[in-house]
Amino acid sequence: AFNTSIAIHSADLADCFSEECRSVIQEQAAALGLAMFSLLVQRCTCLLQESAKAQQSSPKDQDDQDDIKVSSFISDLKELLPSVKVWSDWMLGYPDTWNPPPTSLDLPSQVAVDVWSTLADFCNILTAVNQSEVPLYKDPDDDLTLLILEEDRLLSGFVPLLAAPQDPCYVEKTSDKVIAADCKRVTVLKYFLEALCGQEEPLLAFKGGKYVSVAPVPDTMGKEMGSQEGKQLEDE
């Protein structure tokens, strides 16, 4: 994932003929990155559904079944959320790199995933998550402490993420920092998904009571290259 983001960033700096185009390397790297991201998001959607089912079967949570509690997240989901959050940070920092969407990779059907439909599904279940389980504050106070996510600490200074929004977040000193960190991640991801709806060329929209993909269907990279080669042979 890091190599992919570095390739996209490097190509963006040195290998593009104008501000309104992508180089071949950048196009391929962006398509690969989005394909990887979609698999992560798809898995997180499944794990959120499992977390919701586990919460419903828990006797202590019988009184609050409408919202998914962050504290009910299963362990696999907790492991994947930081990675999804980092990807969303990069995408928020460099929207021109992936919108309009790059040409899709020609992948086997077993692993081919529509990234925008997958994000719409993720958005629909993420709206049911109550990220206010641990209150988050924007301004410092004597009773509060700065919350720094582990992934933000590890990737501090990583060039492809420098343009990502980094708003400080504070929590009560006595709060559960692990749950607070996941509440912060959910907050960031909800903002990211709403940003997809607010793009100049929107990729998600709220229709019929749910989020859906409105992204254009891109050409497939392998098929497109093949058709171009065929056209060249015909011209010769």
Image: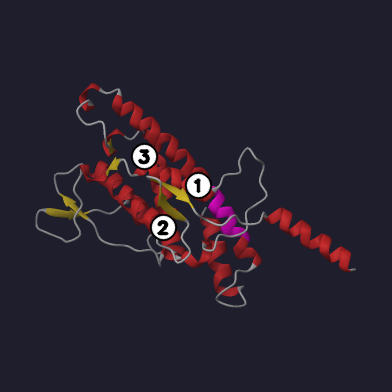
Residue positioned most to the front: 208
Q: At 23% across and 21% down in the image, what residue appears? A: 59
User: How many marks can you see?
Assistant: 3
C-alpha separation, residue under disc 2 versus residue under disc 1: 13 Å
The answer to which of marks 3 and 1 sits earlier in the sequence is 3
Q: Position of residue 77 (x, y in %)?
A: 39, 38
Task: Name the residue type under label 2.
Answer: Cys
Q: Position of residue 92 (x, y in %)?
A: 41, 61
In whole angstroms, how far apart are the C-alphas of marks 3 and 1? 23 Å
Quadrant into which the C terminus falls: bottom right
Q: Is residue 31 magenta?
A: yes
Q: Give the residue displayed 42% in from the left and 55% down from the top.
A: 88
Q: Percent x, y for residue 146?
A: 21, 56
Q: CA distance from mark 2 to mark 3?
A: 26 Å
Q: Please indicate, yes or no, whether residue 128 appears anywhere in the rendered image.
A: yes
Residue drawn where x is 67% and y is 42% of the image: 108
Residue 78: give its label: 3
Task: Name the mark on residue 117.
Answer: 1
SS for callout 1:
helix
Q: Amino acid at mark 3?
A: Lys
